[in-house]
Image (cartoon, grey):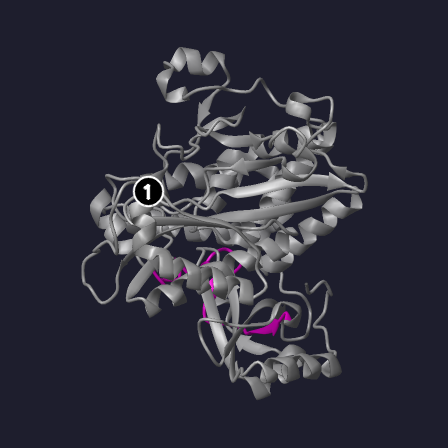
Amino acid sequence: MVTADRIPADAADAARRVESLELAGVELVELSFVDNAGITRVKTVPLGRLASAAVHGVGASPCFDTFGSDDLMVPGRYLGGPDGDLRLIPDLDRAVALAGAPGWAWAPADRFTQDGARYVACQRAFATRQVAAAATQGLTLRMAFEHEWILGRAGEPAFIPAFDGPAYGQIRLEHVAAYARELVSDLQAQGLSVDQFHPEYALAQLELSVAATDPVAAADDAVLVRHTIRTRSLHHGWRATFAPSVDPDGAGSGAHLHLSVHNTDGTLMSGGPGPAGLHPAAESFLAGVLRELPALVAIGAGHPVSLLRLLPSRWAGIWQCWGIETRETALRLITGLPGTGTWSANAEIKCFDATANPYLLAGSVIAAGLAGIADDLKLPAPVTGDPALLDPVQQAAAGIHRLPTSTTEAATALESSTTLATALGPELHDAILTVRRAEADRCAGLDAAKLAETTRWRW
């Protein structure tokens, strides 16, 4: 992880890492960063240029901070426009040869200014700062993203499912067994630990989970996992999409975030005096996340197409409430089996999807949780069942509120969040709002089917 405030410049170390990639047959290296619309952008260099790139960087315009997922740019108050340049600095600690793309390697990049200082709107640096802020309070976070995706046939103008069969069914697995084996092998060869793989609910949908790690690494993993899935899918004549909705009449694809809170003695998610064994700091952390969920939707599910997934009674987590193993609440506490809580207890945030920049999301969730600790927040009573089955009076009495039902409403919640505005800083906060509102304006005239069609292959 790059933690320096200025460009690291260890040329000897860079040369050693380049040598190891050369032994792995690497010829070209892609450097990636994720913009505020959740699109992973890349620059590439020949392997012989990587050591220089690690010291001097590769040029990239700051205009991407206000790019939408449709590649259109609307300048914000601080960022966007044709002026200036930045330096992409690859994090060689995460550089890895790509198993499904022989001759290629990948490394996530941090963004610095041309004079060597940290760029104020670098999303990966933002996540790193929030990890450091937690550390000052004696806390460490572990996170992991779940990955849901849908496979269509490549080269077809319309979406044609790659396979069919019952949800979660063995018949589906039979269609993708060889693909799954190759995909898991790719991920393991790239240093990722796969927890599980299975067919999912929606049409031609699959899911894969990897092991939890520190938040910045978890965001790196999210980029690498999706890249690997897309690449392996193409080998089979399929095209993978992580878009929230392919078919507005069916279930969508999420990117649930799992997290746990720890101190030097171990987990704070189990064995404590609070609800379901939470320790006070973990309870306050989760209460802070719960408080900020409307604003977090703008970061974690902020594109208009996200709303096609965020519907009642689909386990999408549309309600601002929490529950113990309750799949309709936005915040689900997973206690684990008896005796396993010390390593398995965690919280799942269900309302997010792959339109999120994973670095922004990880950092924003930490900022929300730390604010909950600072304010000594407590969780309300947990919710059971499906809140959609309650009438509005019953929902109000139980303190259950619907999360934003439009991109504009979510952006307004983010704009009003002093917690996230302070953590993000004015430049990054404004850039996110600029992107989300511009996307809302450009999608305003599209019906659900056209919206899904237009965005189907963007993530």
The residue that label 1 is drawn on is 169
Provide residue 444's location: percent of width, then percent of height. 27, 45
In which quadrant is the N terminus drawn?
A: bottom right
Q: Which residues are magenta?
A: 64-91
Q: Nearer the viewer, residue 327 or 176?
A: 176
Looking at the picture, does residue 143 appear above or below residue 181? above
Magenta run includes residue 115: no
**SS for dot 1:** loop
Q: Residue extending furthest bottom?
A: 48
Magenta run includes residue 74: yes
Q: Residue at 33% x, 45% y: name it.
A: 170
Q: Residue at 62% x, 32% y: name it.
A: 286
Looking at the picture, does residue 232 appear above or below residue 328? below
Q: Nearer the viewer, residue 94 or 163?
A: 163
Q: Residue at 55% x, 66% y: name it.
A: 190
Q: Residue at 40% x, 58% y: name it.
A: 180
Q: Which quarter of the picture shows residue 177?
A: bottom left
